[in-house]
Image (cartoon, helix red, strand yellow):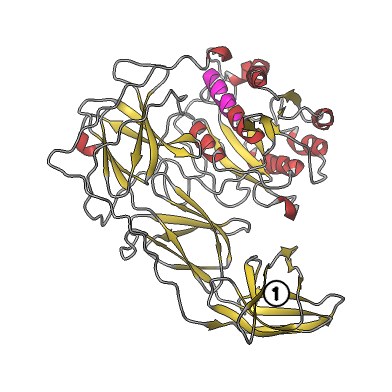
Amino acid sequence: MLGDWTKNETRFKAAARLISTIADSIHAVNPDVAFAVRVFGSQYPAQEKNCFDSRLEVSFSSSNNAQIQTRLNYIQPRGYSPIAWALKETAEKDFTEGNLYAYSIILITDGEESCGGDICATVNTLLSSKISFKPYILSLMDYAPLKQQYDCMGKYLLVTAEKDINNAVKTIIDDNRKILSVKAPGLRATAPRPAPASPAPTVTRSKPAPPAVTEPVKQTPAPSPAPEKVVTPVVTETTPARQKRTLNRVISIKNLRKQNLLYTLPDAEPLKVPKLVIKLADMDPEPPKPRPAIVQPQPGKTPAKPVTTKRTPPKPTTQVTLPYTEISEDAKETSLQIHFTNGQGKVFLTEPKLEFLDSKTKKVIKTAYRNVTAGQPDRIPMQPGTYDISIPGSKAKAENVVIEQGKNKKITIQISRGALAFYYPTAPDRPVKEYVALVSKRFEPGPVVRQRCDEELPYDPANYHIEVNTLPPQMYYIDLDFNSVKLIEILEPGTVHITNASNYGKVQFWYQRGDSFVPFYEMNVSGNAAQQKVEFQPGKYQVRYSNPGQPKLKPEIIVFNVKSNQVTSIEL
């Protein structure tokens, strides 16, 4: 998926656009059709050759277009393509209510099964009784053997050029217009739900499982973007010190990684409803030009300089000596194997970078990663000698480990858990009371831990995904080492104030993600300026809106920047 689809676009970016077009086009026929996204090749690098790597990233909902696109912006291709396994997971865990809904699959891929799975057998034994209408395989690469491999699954369509996108979507809709036109009463009230963080969760179509901590606010499908106009810097003022904030979250974004996409769509039992027609060529009319924003200064206020001094909390200085046991065995190559345990039977599979210091001079002789294969640490080639072993930057180490010529030394080091803590780099002495983090292991099963950002909690050494409920949500991917505290900085927010005194209805905020903008928050501009305030993380944003009484196919757009501890005032 990282290969080029065109000169200026990767296959993965093309797949994301293809999904957006599919959702928008089918919803133009019937807004009650529900979509879900299951991914494979998402959680483990290709070197690990993991053939059970599949997870439901977005649960079924009829109004989750924006959520799907937001997730795709965070995903990077990583590993193998266990397509047959992903289809099995889809059949057993996603398609659970065949008596109520008409299921099908759209598989978007640029390659073949890479784990030796039997796609045809999986489709015949598990999916044939659960799929109500024809599956589709959309191939982003023109390679003849792929068509033969997928012929048993469904209709194979090449999408190797821009013109093929609309042709493929039109084919899917035309083939299934009768069933796609069926309405499902009562389903449109279902708001998009974030997918659970644990791998391969069970999917419930009628009532998607709510997130463990926060309730998303209903969000309308994202309108297509219009030309942007960057406004001149707005007048700002320093906000008073905050002790408590009330925030409304819109989208909860979990761990996001993907190699290929399984795009599943069900609908409800047949009902007599009007037939809706979509004209794909008319999906992108000429947008109106945005008008300049009018910036309202705050009377009697002088903009104050935000605090920008960055201070880092001091690192621990206490030296910790780690106990260990050792076993030597004859070997052709002098080497070392390192096991980590908590001393109570638990083994840690974390793969940190290690430093090997001469025990006498304390100089670093060698650095190497502890790699783990099938639960066992790989051997690290070593020269004979006596070493101290530590993680760079850590004060904890195992001392005086003797490496003998022609021996493989197996040592089991007893380690303590690490810990996570949060701080404001511009105000390190002020507790981060305003936010909550969801913490989960990236590559191992386990619970999602809800941690207040003003507390420090212990965790096993591992690689973690952390989501903080700022606006927009902040994502972190960190390696937590043993016997250490990982400090995660959170930027202090700024305030956005819409000063309009007339009713504009709902306006939508988008934030910059890479080279594009994605939606994340809606505000009701009722004309009560005192209530039209919200706190965002520092960064570049858009507000998209329509003038009252002048409905347009494309919204007007204002681009603005948010800075910590400052008020950004905008009049639409």
Tell me the residue at 59%/36% (across/down).
Answer: 36
Assess whether residue 41 is covered by the magenta stretch.
no
Tell me the residue at 62%/31% (across/down).
Answer: 9
Q: Position of residue 205 (x, y in %)?
A: 56, 37
Q: Quadrant of residue 233?
A: top left
Q: Would you call the spot at circle 1 few (<14 residues within 10 Å), some (14-19), or many (20 or more)?
A: many
Classified by dominant secondary structure, the portion drawn in magenta counts as helix
Which of the two residues, 344 or 456, is positioned nearer the viewer here?
Answer: 456
Tell me the residue at 62%/58% (across/down).
Answer: 445
Tell me the residue at 71%/29% (across/down).
Answer: 140
Numbered disc 1: secondary structure: strand
Q: Is residue 507 left or right of residue 106?
A: left
Image quadrant for the N terminus? top right
Confirm whether residue 120 shows in the render: yes
Q: Position of residue 452 (x, y in %)?
A: 40, 60
> Vertical placement of 347 versus 148: above or below?
below
Which residues are drawn in magenta? Answer: 19-30
Residue underneath mark 1: 338
Q: Is residue 483 left or right of residue 132?
A: left
Q: Amino acid at mark 1?
A: Ile
Q: Quadrant of residue 294?
A: top left
Q: Residue furthest left?
A: 300
> Vertical placement of 226 versus 262: above or below?
above
> Vertical placement of 333 versus 438: above or below?
below
Which of the two residues, 433 or 124, is positioned nearer the viewer here?
Answer: 433
Image quadrant for the C terminus? top left
Q: Position of residue 476 (x, y in %)?
A: 50, 54
Q: Is residue 364 left or right of residue 287?
A: right
